[in-house]
Amino acid sequence: MKSTLLRLGYLLSVIIAVGSFYYFDLQRYFQIEYLAHFLNYIEENKLISALLLSSILILFSVLNLPTFYFSILFGYLFGFIPGLTISLISRTLGVILAYYNIHFLFFDVFTQKYGGQTQIKKINRLIEEKGFSAIIILRSLYIFPTSFLNAAFSISKIKRVPYFWGSAIGLLPTSIINVSMGYFIHQDKSLSDNPLLLISSILIAIALVIFSVLYMKKLK
């Protein structure tokens, strides 16, 4: 009964949060055009601003609200390297907390109801064997929303440590791209003005992803 109330409470919170977010157009408060008005305050209080925006990003992750524009904001407000660091740490923490939340509330229910099905067994077996590689690749792409991946992997049988590390590595390429966009917007430049920073960073990120996948395959 207690678990059921917790699940209903969480689902209700998500519905209210998502509905309010889009109905009241709250995303406008997290766009560059709006926060640019507070740029002086943010620059004078970078630590507080970074902690506040990071906390909001993590909360958004738990509530399945969109978070992609936060990385752009971090690049715009804090610069490339600090913005990338804040973005990657915040997004990874958001993934971890979302995992524990969804896993705690829904894993047992999902397993009891669907765990015996042949297709679910095959998927879980594949995730247990290739989960690290899969999460790196899926997180690296813009195809699947972060909230979808958070929910899907949290109710699977993927091991925690490979999932967390795989998520951190997989989030790196998109973080680099988004942070770079924010950084170039703040500098009033386009990619053609300084392509070396973005291209070299993406190549490093891709190399890291490939190395991680090959290394895990070698361990097996």
Image (tube, rainbow, N blue to C red):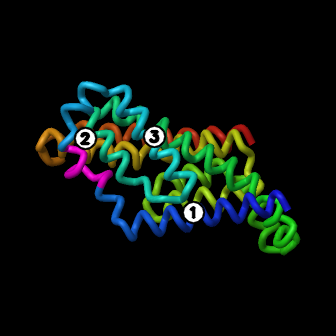
Q: Residue at x 57, y 40 (%)?
A: 212
- Sequence-wise first label, 1 or 2: 1
Mark 3 neighbour density, 10 Å: few (under 14) some (14–19) many (20 or more): few
Residue 72 visible in the displayed image: yes
Q: Amino acid at mark 1?
A: Val
Q: Residue at x 62, y 66 (%)?
A: 12
Q: Quick check: 102 left or right of 62?
A: right
Residue 125 visible in the displayed image: no
- Sequence-wise first label, 1 or 3: 1
Q: Amino acid at mark 2?
A: Tyr
Residue at mark 3 to residue at mark 2: CA–CA distance: 26 Å
Q: Nearer the viewer, mark 3 or mark 2?
A: 2
Q: Would you name the residue on which mark 2 appears?
A: 76
Residue 6 is situated, as x and y percent measured from the top left of the image, at 74, 58
Q: Would you name the residue on which mark 1 appears?
A: 14
The numbered disc on residue 207 is 3
Q: Nearer the viewer, mark 1 or mark 3?
A: 1
Name the dominant secondary structure of the magenta segment.
helix
- Sequence-wise first label, 3 or 2: 2
The numbered disc on residue 150 is none
The magenta segment:
29-36
Residue 203 is situated, as x and y percent measured from the top left of the image, at 37, 41
Residue 132 is situated, as x and y percent measured from the top left of the image, at 65, 47
- Of 143 and 93, the residue lying toward us: 93
- Of 214 and 32, the residue lying toward us: 32
Q: Is residue 92 magenta?
A: no
Q: Residue at x 38, y 33 (%)?
A: 50
- Disc 2 element: helix
Residue at mark 1 to residue at mark 2: CA–CA distance: 29 Å
Residue 208 is situated, as x and y percent measured from the top left of the image, at 49, 38
- Disc 3 element: helix
